[in-house]
């Protein structure tokens, strides 16, 4: 499955990332929980790899230049994030209409709607931004 993310109102391109398909039948609720769990695990791994001395490689420089930001110092470790808290936040944000979800170009509006996912399915997470001055 391909996961795409986009923030409406920003000029940044879609982020596209292949993601393994979760096992078993899925609903949007279970799929979001699966994705959030993956992201929290990756976050904790990045936090663990932050050392005292960080040397930038050529790849770090080229990746940073492509992203528009080169970070030279490790970021300070923030508080502990649990998959349960992060999932609860993601589900609340969906319920509050802060982002839309599309599976293969079909908008999913119900967290408990059964999903049909294939290896070549595309999941789009479209984050909305508030208008200023309104």
Image (cartoon, rainbow, N blue to C red):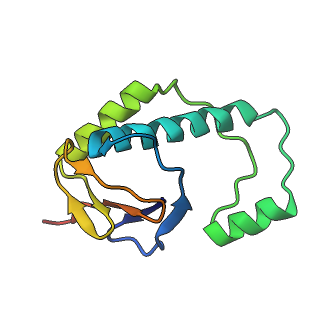
Task: Please state if 59 lies on the left or on the right of 128 as rendered.
Answer: right
Task: Please state if 1 lies on the left or on the right of 127 as rendered.
Answer: right
Numbered disc total:
0
Up-down relation of residue 34 to residue 132 (above or below): above
* Residue 106 rendering spot, x and y as whole percentages: 24, 66
Q: Where on the picture, by quarter, is residue 129?
A: bottom left
Q: Where on the picture, by quarter, is residue 100?
A: bottom left
Up-down relation of residue 128 to residue 37 (above or below): below
The quadrant of the picture occupied by the C terminus is bottom left
Up-down relation of residue 55 to residue 46 (above or below): below
x 53%, y 53%: residue: 19
Q: Which of 13 and 123 is in front in this view?
A: 123
x 41%, y 63%: residue: 121
Q: Which of 33 and 45 is in front in this view?
A: 33
x 70%, y 60%: residue: 70
x 75%, y 51%: residue: 72
Q: Where on the picture, by quarter, is residue 27?
A: top left
Q: Which of 39 and 33 is in front in this view?
A: 33
> Furthest residue to the left?
134
* Residue 88 rendering spot, x and y as whole percentages: 31, 31
* Residue 42 rendering spot, x and y as whole percentages: 60, 39
Task: Please state if 77 lies on the left or on the right of 72 as rendered.
Answer: left
* Residue 62 rendering spot, x and y as whole percentages: 76, 69
């Amino acid at each position: 499955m391909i996961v795409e993310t986009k923030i409406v109102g920003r000029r940044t391109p879609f982020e596209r990332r292949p993601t393994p398909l979760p096992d078993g039948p899925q609903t949007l609720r279970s799929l979001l929980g699966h994705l959030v769990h993956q992201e929290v695990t990756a976050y904790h791994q990045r936090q663990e790899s932050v050392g005292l001395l960080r040397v930038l490689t050529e790849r770090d420089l080229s990746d940073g230049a492509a992203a528009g930001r080169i970070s030279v110092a490790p970021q300070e470790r923030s508080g502990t994030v649990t998959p349960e808290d992060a999932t609860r936040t993601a589900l609340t944000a969906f319920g509050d209409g802060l982002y839309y979800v599309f599976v293969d170009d079909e908008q999913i509006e119900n967290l408990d709607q059964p999903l049909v996912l294939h290896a070549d399915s595309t999941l789009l997470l479209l984050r909305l931004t508030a208008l200023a001055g309104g």
